[in-house]
Image: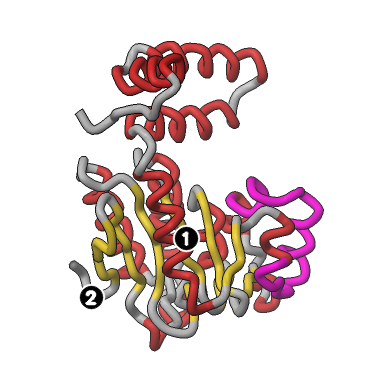
Amino acid sequence: MNDGVLVEMPAPGVTRLVLNQPDSFNALSSQMLSALDGALQSVAENAACRVVVIAAQGRAFSAGHDLREMRSHPDHDFYTQLFAQCSRMMVRIQNLPQPVIAQVQGIATAAGCQLVSMCDLALASHDARFAVSGINYGLFCSTPSVGLSRNMHRKQAMEMLLTGDFIDAQTAQTRGLINQVVNADSLEDAVLQLCAKIVAKPEPAVRLGKALFYQQLEMGLNAAYQLAGQTMACNMMDDTAQEGFQAFLDKRKPNWSS
């Protein structure tokens, strides 16, 4: 456990990483980025972990980079290293073998909004709000635009990036940034219900499927289908798929416990 990120196991197969600096609105300082990246590395190597949840303490999910830290280091090399550190952590989320779910309360701005966009799934409370507001302070949110543009239609992403305006949770769902909007007091339960559905599925299929999904998005159509076919062939050779198909033919539920 790091003071910046709490590691919890709220249910079998589920690891929850909780951003735990509410006084700074869970700003993604270099220390917070290091703590979160280290926690992600640890869960990647944990075979007992099937789903990862990224949540936060306090009124904000994350307000993005720590502006005080950035302002106190007006140095090009520092900025380059900071944004590279942040990008490595964001990419690690998609490279993680386990699905990652963002549990969003309060605000998620700039790199905090980027964090939501890079998670595989996201649930938010009705009071959550999202923005990439760097433009209001003279800084186009370039790195957040990478994740945002891969979730939303381009014009919707550009509107957020060029205006810095907040959108509410319902709008975020409509635009594809999050999956569900629930009442604040139901958010944790809704996330755990989604986790349980994923944990109930065979781990090899989930792991292969997540890796394939992101790899094929960066490919041309023919290469994507070639990779998808190879992945399905490998998946079919796994015992869990063989059992699943046999169960379908036998008109019974699959037995993946053995």
Image quarter in which the C terminus is found = top left
Place of residue 176 in the rendered image (x, y in percent of width and height, measured from the top left): 67, 53
Q: SS at mark 1?
A: strand
Query: Which numbered disc flags the more N-terminal residue, 1 or 2?
Result: 2
Residue located 36% across and 27% down the image: 254
**In front of the other: 211 or 154:** 211
Q: Is residue 228 left or right of residue 99?
A: right
Q: Is residue 233 above or below residue 248?
A: above
Place of residue 165 in the rendered image (x, y in percent of width and height, measured from the top left): 73, 74
User: Which range is magenta?
Assistant: 147-170
Residue type pointed to by label 1: Ala
Q: Is residue 157 magenta?
A: yes
User: Which residue, given by chain and number where applicable, does mark 1 sit on?
Assistant: 102
**In front of the other: 108 or 234:** 234
Q: Is residue 242 above or below residue 23?
A: above
Place of residue 146 in the rendered image (x, y in percent of width and height, measured from the top left): 60, 50
Image quarter in which the N terminus is found = bottom left
Q: SS at mark 2?
A: loop
Magenta span: chief secondary structure? helix
Residue 103 visible in image: yes
Residue located 25% across and 53% down the image: 12
User: Which residue, given by chain and number where applicable, does mark 2 sit on?
Assistant: 3
Residue located 77% across and 70% down the image: 163
Q: Is residue 164 magenta?
A: yes
Question: Residue 64 has which mark?
Answer: none
Q: Is residue 20 above or below residue 206?
A: below
Residue 222 found in image quarter: top right
Residue 179 found in image quarter: bottom right
Q: Is residue 232 left or right of residue 14?
A: right
